[in-house]
Image: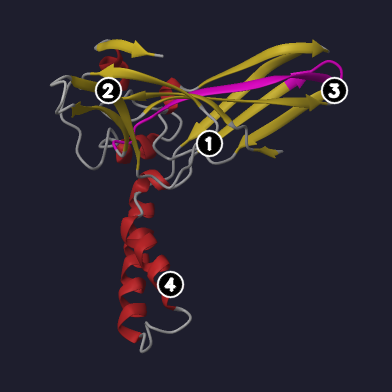
Amino acid sequence: MRINPPCKKFVIFSGGGGLISRSQVVEVPAGQTTFEISEVPASFDPNTTTVELLDITMGDVELSQTDVRRPDKRIVDSFIQREKTASDSIIQASTDLRGSNRDRIIQICESAYYRRYEDMSGTITVSISAKMPSKFTLQINYFIEDTRIKWKPTIHVNINEQTKKAHIEGYLMVMNNSDFNFENVELQFAEFDLVREVGEEGFLDNIEEEQAVQTEMPKTKMLQNLRRMKNLIQ
């Protein structure tokens, strides 16, 4: 069964990425039920993925298995490169970029040029065992490792020319340049020092090794970095 639990809470890191909590009330019959979670960014860290069964109002259920997997980066990069090549061909072959299809052509080409591995989808599959029909809240937590989602502080200073007094306002600016949208989400902001400078590839520099062993997931540097987290801003 494919479901799309909405994102309820997002702890955004100042250095990029963060912790996502998604939950949804589900009902299952007696026996084994498997849920496939949709819209999981490929940038999620399989080592940090947790699944919880909360608010069990009826029945007796337990988590029997969780499978996580990210797409093969080599295949995805090859696919994205083909899209970029196709976009070049579309632009070169288009004789009327002022016509009715202009906006659509530009949208397709821009999407291809800015798409990255992190915009693809990973896989989280959850198997639930129930002794009788049951109802509960399925909650899934995982870190994402995407430097395009982050926050930074900003300050506005207004000076009154007559009174010579300054009015200072502080803000947190949130940036999300990924293909994933997060609506009606409780936000928290963590000041997060990175052990190393993260490039455009984020923390995914060992993805080829990960895909080679498939189920044996190598540890990323995310958990090490979490120890350097300083403050959590509600």
Residue linked to disc 2:
170
Q: Please tell me in which quadrant of the rendered image residue 172 appears.
A: top left
Percent x, y of residue 122: 48, 40
Is disc 2 placed on a helix, strand or loop? strand
Q: Quadrant of the N terminus?
A: top right
Is disc 3 placed on a helix, strand or loop? loop
Q: Please tell me in which quadrant of the rendered image residue 29 appears.
A: top right
- Mark 4 crowdedness (10 Å alpha carbons): few <14, some 14-19, many ≥20: few
Q: Image height check: is 116 above or below 95?
A: above
Which one is nearer the viewer's eye here, 180 or 127?
A: 180
Residues under numbered marks 3 and 2 in contact, where contact means CB atoms less than 8 Å apart: no
Q: What range is drawn magenta here?
A: 129-147
- Mark 2 crowdedness (10 Å alpha carbons): few <14, some 14-19, many ≥20: few
Residue linked to disc 3:
30
Which amino acid is tagged 3? Ala
Residue linked to disc 1:
183
Percent x, y of residue 132: 86, 17
Q: Real-space Cα distance between discs 3 and 4?
A: 51 Å
Which amino acid is tagged 2? Gly
> Closer to the observer: label 3 or label 1?
1
Q: Real-space Cα distance between discs 1 and 4?
A: 26 Å
Which amino acid is tagged 4? Asp
Percent x, y of residue 175: 33, 37
**138 drawn magenta:** yes
At a point 42% along the width and 67% down the height, the residue shown is: 108
> Closer to the observer: label 3 or label 2?
2
